[in-house]
Image (tube, rainbow, N blue to C red):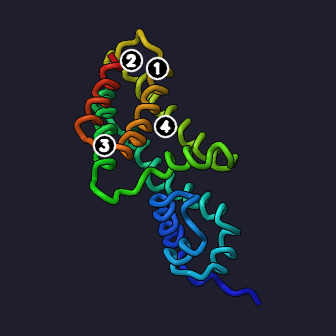
């Protein structure tokens, strides 16, 4: 008779996600994960297959918890420039929240795992494409309303903004200087025309 799982799966994945955000994939052992999740390693393997399976589950949770709400925030805005400004401010607030701030799991996965794990690369690609498509739609609508100059490609601007958002996260991990990050965001906003 099979034993039933005796832990909250989402809470366990959340605990693992925070460990991966703090120490990366390579810096995290199965023992670290089991301790953070408050389960035995046997339960971890039974539920997720292996460390890689748990990492993919953590990426999926991160997407649902952080990336998709960020995308919805962009979709819900009115004035496109103010919506993008608010998005930049949210990212900068997250980056500069204080010591011990966990890193963006998407950026960490891109730097550490995307080149060697096709499943990770695909998850990152679909999340990034959704963000870029959302920004494209926001910019195209704003160009139609005359809020943003139509002399630049909406697709090019959207791609540039995605790179800027992720670049802020990378540079913020190196030096979380709010003034410098805000200046970079202002330059990006200026590119909207």
Mark 2 and mark 1: span between their CA atoms? 8 Å
Q: Secondary structure at mark 2?
A: helix
Q: Quadrant of the image for the C terminus?
A: top left
Task: Give me the residue at 31% from left, 31% from top.
Answer: 185
Q: Are marks 3 and 2 in contact (CB under 8 Å)?
A: no
Task: Give me the residue at 40% from left, 45% from top.
Answer: 70
Q: Secondary structure at mark 1?
A: helix
For residue 161, side relative to residue 117 (left or right): left
Closer to the eye: label 3 or 1: 3
Which residue is denoted by mark 4 in the rendering?
A: 131
* Quarter location, residue 4: bottom right
Which residue is denoted by mark 2 in the rendering?
A: 143
Which residue is denoted by mark 1 in the rendering?
A: 154
Mark 3 and mark 4: span between their CA atoms? 17 Å
Mark 3 and mark 1: span between their CA atoms? 24 Å
| As drawn, 175 above or below 54 | above
What x and y, as percent, mark residue 187? Answer: 31, 24
N-term mark: 2 or 4: 4
């Amino acid at each position: 008779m099979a034993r039933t799982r005796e832990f909250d799966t989402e809470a366990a994945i959340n605990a693992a996600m925070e460990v991966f955000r703090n120490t990366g994939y390579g810096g995290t052992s199965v023992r670290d994960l089991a301790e953070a999740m408050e389960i035995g390693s046997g339960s971890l393997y039974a539920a997720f297959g292996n460390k890689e399976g748990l990492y993919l589950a953590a990426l999926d949770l991160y997407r649902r918890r952080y990336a998709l709400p960020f995308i919805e925030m962009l979709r819900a805005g009115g004035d496109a420039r103010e919506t993008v400004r608010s998005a930049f401010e949210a990212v900068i607030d997250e980056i500069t929240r204080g010591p011990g701030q966990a890193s963006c799991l998407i950026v960490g996965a891109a730097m550490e795992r995307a080149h060697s794990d096709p499943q990770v690369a695909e998850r990152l690609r679909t999340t990034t494409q959704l963000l870029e498509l959302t920004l494209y739609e926001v910019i195209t609508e704003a160009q139609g309303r005359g809020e943003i100059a139509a002399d630049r490609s909406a697709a090019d601007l959207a791609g540039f903004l995605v790179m800027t958002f992720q670049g802020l996260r990378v540079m913020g991990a190196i030096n979380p200087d709010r003034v410098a990050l805000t200046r970079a965001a202002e330059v990006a906003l200026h590119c909207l025309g």
